[in-house]
Image (cartoon, grey):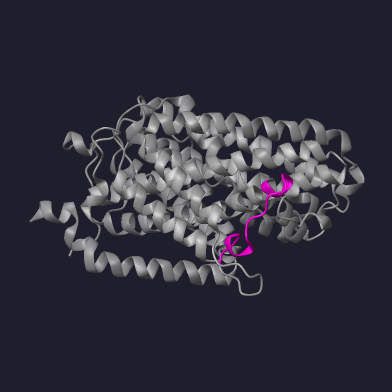
Amino acid sequence: MDLFRKKPLVAPQGANTDNLSKTLGALDLTTLGVGAIIGTGIFVMTGVAAAEHAGPALVLSFIIAGFACVLSALCYSEFASSIPVSGSAYAYSYVAFGELLAWILGWDLVLEYGVAAAAVSSGWSGYFQGLLEGFGLHLPTVLTGAYNADKGTIVNLPAIVIILLISYLLTRGVKETARFNAIMVVIKLSVVLLFIFTGIFYVKPENWTPFMPFGFHGVVNGAATVFFAYIGFDAISTAAEEVKRPQRDLPIGIISSLAICTVLYIAVSLILTGIVPYQNLNVSDPVSFALRFVDQNMIAGLISVGAIAGMTTVLLVMLFGQTRLLFAISRDGLLPRSLSKVNAKTHTPVRSTWMVGGIVAVLTGFVPLDRLVNLTSIGTLFAFLIVSLGIISLRASNPELKRGFKVPWVPFIPLLSAAACGYLMYNLGSETWIGFMIWLAVGLVIYALYGYRNSKLNNNSK
């Protein structure tokens, strides 16, 4: 019973119907990354993290989380330039560690992308309803949120609708998806810059005192919480088979998008806590709230539009990453092979796209998701940790492999990356760890009952 059989280091081959279309370049990948990263984190989570965890030292939380991400991004870049196939950390682990750990990583990423998309669509719904109310339009209460007897809500209709619309867009083709994403990214970057250049004139340095009201422990807890804000750059690597020059363009897309977003997060968190005392930031729309706080109501309204655009692109990339992940796992036989069928006209995995869209729509429409966001963070950190260690393993087992990008100072950088991710995981609550372990246990049962026997590597060895 070979649980650690490894995939060979070759690009996927197969019938043309199972291949994706190579249409993406470095700029497309950078905008996909920015589209995934700038969203709920900057428009929603900054306020909660400042009020409950870090205070004005939120900027340090973002720097710590960003540092962990930069280290992981270097490791992802080497893997993406060396093994340019769909599947991200799942595919890399299949080559570096073997099938069992690859399945665990794949199942882990299913959790990351699925819960992230459901949580973000719930936040999108809140901002969209706020925009409607600004025009005097109100949805019936029963349609405004997941089931909550106290509030009288039954289903979050706007969240369901946006998930289904994005699923439809994803089935039309990757180039069309990238073009729409680029437009939305321009809108939300313009709004973020508008906040920075408007808010900087209202900063009161006394609001930064005390700078670290919850101590360094609060800063680290804040970093573990805002790590959710950085999730997304890894989704770029799921598009590897649709990139024209993966060895060159994937590292550029991953590192440049992360660098842009880290600078913006630092600037926004400094200005946000400089405008509003951190105790007042525990609101659902902290960026808009800060501008209303200084009577800039018209710009606050524009920020809400930008937040909607921002969360739309996050949803787009999360669902995109989920469908490409299932495509890769299915093609390897660990899930039903029907999920890897590609439409001959649009060159997209239509069946898996609609399946993902349907499941996420049900989750976000009917299930309260407040406590599930940290599951996304722990799932992502676990994936980053394994990818970091995978660099060391692959350097040892395949030193002659052609690498378009190489992590410097191996094994020091990968070990530091793994340690940083492990430390942030340690600072997540016990409830998050219990949920994560239950999810992994369910995944192992599925692998034992289906994946092991139907694996393409298993069939090839017979």
The secondary structure making up most of the magenta span is loop
Q: Residue at x 60, y 49 (%)?
A: 124
Query: Of 24 and 63, which appears nearest the observer?
Result: 24
Give the left or right position of residue 35, taking residue 441 as reference. Answer: right
Q: Residue at x 61, y 32 (%)?
A: 260
Question: Looking at the image, which residue sits at the far bottom?
Answer: 149
Q: Quadrant of the N terminus?
A: bottom left
Measuring from the top left, give residue 289's x and y in whole percent: 79, 48
Q: Quadrant of the C terminus?
A: bottom left
Dividing the picture into quarters, in which one does residue 265 lie?
A: top right
Q: Magenta includes 133?
A: yes
Say whether residue 15 is visible: yes
Residue range of the region highlighted in magenta in the rendering? 132-146
Give the left or right position of residue 183, taking residue 64 as reference. Answer: left
Measuring from the top left, give residue 323's x and y in whole percent: 36, 47
Measuring from the top left, give residue 176's x and y in whole percent: 42, 30
